[in-house]
Image (tube, coloured by chain):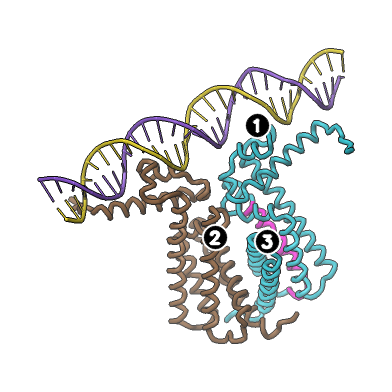
Chain colours: A brown, B cyan, C yellow, D purple
Amino acid sequence: MSETRPESRLERKERTRRAILDAALELCEDSSLVALSLRQVAGRVGIVPTGFYRHFESIESLGMTLVDESFASLRAMLRDVRRMDRDFSGSFAVIVDRSVEILVEHVARQRAHFAFIARERTAGPPAVRDAIRHEIDLCERELATDLARIPGTDAWSGEDLRILSNLIVHAMVSTAESLIAAAGRPAMEEQIAATARTQLRMVIIGALQWRSRAGD
Amino acid sequence: MSETRPESRLERKERTRRAILDAALELCEDSSLVALSLRQVAGRVGIVPTGFYRHFESIESLGMTLVDESFASLRAMLRDVRRMDRDFSGSFAVIVDRSVEILVEHVARQRAHFAFIARERTAGPPAVRDAIRHEIDLCERELATDLARIPGTDAWSGEDLRILSNLIVHAMVSTAESLIAAAGRPAMEEQIAATARTQLRMVIIGALQWRSRAGD
DNA sequence: GTCGTGGGTGAACGTCCGTGCACTCAATGT
DNA sequence: ACATTGAGTGCACGGACGTTCACCCACGAC
C-alpha cells in the first residue's frame, strides 16, 4: 500500500495553488486570459468559486503570476543556450544549430508556457501585456550583451547590436509560434527548425557584412 | 441648411452594418474578440441587442468580416509597395526606405485594422486565427514571387525564397506591432522605422551573400 | 392606394458571472 | 488539552450574457 504522508497545511495550500495555475494555463489555451472566468478555473480545480480568493485576488493577478512562471521557463532556456555558447564557442553555424535545437526542445516541453506568452503578449489584460513586453525587452538586451562577447563582432555599434537583437528575438518568437501551431507533428517541426536555422544564418551573415558596406 | 437626402432602405442598413463593424473594432481594441459581447456592440451602436442578428449571425462571423476588411487594407498597402517597386526599380536601399515609409503610413492610417490582425492572429476564435494565418501565408507567397522578379537574385532557390519571405514578413509584422504600441508618438515611430530599415538591409545583404557561402 | 418585406423593438427566459458573508473543521502553536 | 487560524464551503444577490418570440411601422414594389 502507498504510504501517504500526512501532508502539512502549507503543502496542501501550495498544491491547490499549483492546480489553479495549471488549470488556468490549460483553460485559456483556446481563448485568452480576458475571456477566462474565475468560476471556470475553480470548477476545473474542484473547489468552490469563492475558494479562489484564498490564493489570488483576481484573474489578472493570477495572469501576472503566470507571466513570471512562463519567463522563468524561458530564462532557463536562455541559460542553456548561453552555457552551450561558452562551452563550444565554435563557429556560428554550430552555435546556430544548437540554439535552434534548444528552442525546439524547450517549446516542446513547455508548450503551454510559450503559447501563453505568445497569446497574452498581444491579447492579455493591459498589465499583463506590459509585463510581457518588458520581459521581452530584457531578453533583447541580454542577447545584445551576449552578441557583443563573441569574437569577430567588434565593428557593431551599440545601436547595431540593439537592432540585431531585436530582429533575432522577434524571429525566434515567430519560430516559437509556428512550432506551437505545428502542435507536435514532427515533420512540420523539423521543417520549421530548418527554416529558423537558415534565417538565423542569413541574418548573421548580413549583420557581419553590415558595417563594411553601410551604404547601398 | 444641409439638404438631407431621404436615404434609402439599403443605405440605412449598410450604415448600421458599418456602425456595428466600427464599434466592434473599437471595443475589442483593449481585450479581444473572444471577450467581446454582442450586447456591448449593440449598446455602442445604439440598437437593441436582438437587432444585431439582422446583420451578423454571431460575434465570430462578424470577426471573419473584420478579417476580410483588415486584409483589404493590408493588400492595398502591398499594392502601393509593389507599384513603387516597379516605378523606381532602383537600388535595394531605395526600395527598403520607400517600403518602410509606406508601412509606417498605412499603420498610422489604419491603426485599428492592423491592431486587430496582430491581436486576433494569436488570440481570436480558432476560425479567425486560421483565416488570418492563411492570409499571412498568402502574403509570404506573394512576396516570394516579387523577390524572384528583382534582378540579382537568380541564385536563390524556391526554398530560399520561401524562407526569406517568411523572415521579412514576420519582421514587418513585428514592426507593425511596435508602431501600434508607439501609439502615435512621432519620435518613437521614427526610431522604429529606422530600426526596420536597418533590419531589412541586414537581411537582404545576408540573403544575397547566402548562396555564395552556404556553409559556415 | 394597398400590402408585404424587413430593420428595429421590448419583454422575458435561463445561464453564467463576480462577490459578500457566515460557516466548518482539521492542522497548528502554545 | 485548548484556542487559534485559515483553506475550503454553501448560499444568496444583482447584473450581464445569448437567444426566443411577438410585435411594430416605414419603405418600396405593385
> Which mark, residue B48?
1
Read off the residue under disc 2: A130
Check the image and report above or below for A29 versus B101. above
Residue plotted at (67% across, 31% down): B51
Residue plotted at (44% across, 73% down): A79
In the image, residue B19 lies at what x, y percent? 72, 41
Give the amino acid at mark 2: Asp
Q: Is residue A187 left or right of residue A4?
A: right
The N terminus of chain B is located in which quarter? top right
CB under 8 Å between discs 3 and 1: no
Q: Secondary structure at mark 2?
A: helix
The range drawn in magenta is B132-153
User: Are the residues under marks 3 and 1 on the same chain?
Assistant: yes
CB under 8 Å between discs 3 and 2: no
Check the image and report above or below for A140 versus A214. above
Question: Which quadrant of the view contains residue A49?
Answer: top left
Residue plotted at (83% across, 66% down): B86
